[in-house]
Image (cartoon, grey):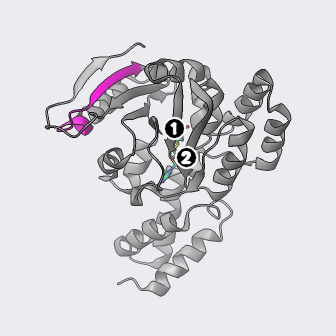
Amino acid sequence: MQTQDELEALVRAVQSSAKYRMVSVDLIRSIGARELLARGSLRDAIKACKSKLHQVGAAYMPARAQYERWEQSLRAAAGDQTALRSACRQVLAQHASTRERLPIVEAIFQRTLVELAPVESVLDVACGLNPLAAPWMPLAPAARYDACDIYADMVAFIRHCLPLMGLSGDVAVRDVTDGLPERPPADVALLLKAVPCLEQIDKGCVPRILDSLPTRHIVVSYPVRSLGGADRRMVDNYAAHMRSLLQGRNWLCQRFDFDTELVFLLEKPARPSGTAEATLKQGAS
Ligand SMILES: C[S@@+](CC[C@H](N)C(=O)[O-])C[C@H]1O[C@@H](n2cnc3c(N)ncnc32)[C@H](O)[C@@H]1O
């Protein structure tokens, strides 16, 4: 039987590790509470909690983040599109997820967002460093870019970077399996390569998140890369995952296949209507 004291001891133990100090305390508490119930001892629960936090976040993070230095480089480049893209590219290369996206960074946003351009507002969920890909997105001038993730230092860094990229908006520390931050409706939400991570924390959270996003359009993507390139089985499994998410939702869905990422542009109906099956059409690839 877990006690509040045990849970607080677990939180302190996890936060004492430099690797997890900046992670949302709400997420540590929620994973910790479940692990205390499932494991025999506090020690095992701490180990299991750290292991889960590694899988869903730390595994992608830069070994040594240099947020101050990166912010300086963006500040020096602000106002010069070529220099800004070059500074952003260097930062995007520091996070495993955006590093993998770099070869397709222009294509992925230009193709998936073309019908919505110029995009006035974005909500980037479980964003990682992806907001720094904004210079490659078809955004309106001074677009609003809201985002959230579980790392307080990364969130603060992105918050400082938005005005340097000519954008407004806010970035929040948030465990989205427990609900989205309150934000105004946006033209499009991005949920990029985050579904497998979020499902490791809470298997049923993704339909809940998709339904509660205050946007009609949602770009959802899945990682499909294994050593040697795109893995056909990953593509098929994630395509099936998307089909199951769309069951019972009368949403439009366009599919885009890229070398390292399988992308879907979802469109909710303008007003709630029946529960006809989603229409899946093949998009440009
Ligand atoms: C595979 S990375 C994808 C990052 C980014 N969306 C991209 O495509 O480059 C998964 C991201 O989800 C974040 N994350 C994991 N669990 C989360 C949670 N419960 N709430 C919010 N973000 C979470 C991680 O910190 C990490 O940045």
Taking the spot 57% from the left edge, 47% from the top edge, the residue there is 59
257 or 181, nearer to the observer: 181
Q: Does residue 222 appear to the left or right of 153 in the view shown?
A: left
Residue 220 visible (yes or no): yes
**Image mark count:** 2
Q: Is residue 10 magenta?
A: no
* Relative image position of residue 18 (x, y in whole percent): 69, 63
Question: Residue 1 is drawn in which quadrant?
Answer: bottom left
Crowding near the residue tagged with mark 2, few <14, some 14–19, many ≥20 C-alpha atoms within 10 Å: many
Q: Nearer the viewer, mark 1 or mark 2?
A: 1
Under circle 2, the secondary element is: strand
Taking the spot 52% from the left edge, 37% from the top edge, the residue there is 121
80 or 175, nearer to the observer: 80
Q: Is residue 248 magenta?
A: yes
If you read the primary sequence from the N terminus, does the residue marked by circle 1 or circle 2 appear first?
1
Under circle 1, the secondary element is: strand
Tag of residue 104: none
Question: Which contiguous range is marked in magenta?
Answer: 244-256
Q: Does residue 275 appear to the left or right of 261 in the view shown?
A: left
Taking the spot 28% from the left edge, 34% from the top edge, the residue there is 270
* Relative image position of residue 284 (x, y in whole percent): 40, 13
Circles 1 and 2, Cβ within 8 Å, touching? The answer is yes
The residue under label 2 is: 147
* For residue 53, above or below residue 165: below
227 or 139, nearer to the observer: 139
Residue 258 visible (yes or no): no
The amino acid type found where label 2 is placed reads: Ala
Question: Residue 236 is drawn in which quadrant?
Answer: top left
The residue under label 1 is: 122
Q: Does residue 51 appear to the left or right of 79 in the view shown?
A: left
Taking the spot 48% from the left edge, 71% from the top edge, the residue there is 29
Crowding near the residue tagged with mark 1, few <14, some 14–19, many ≥20 C-alpha atoms within 10 Å: many
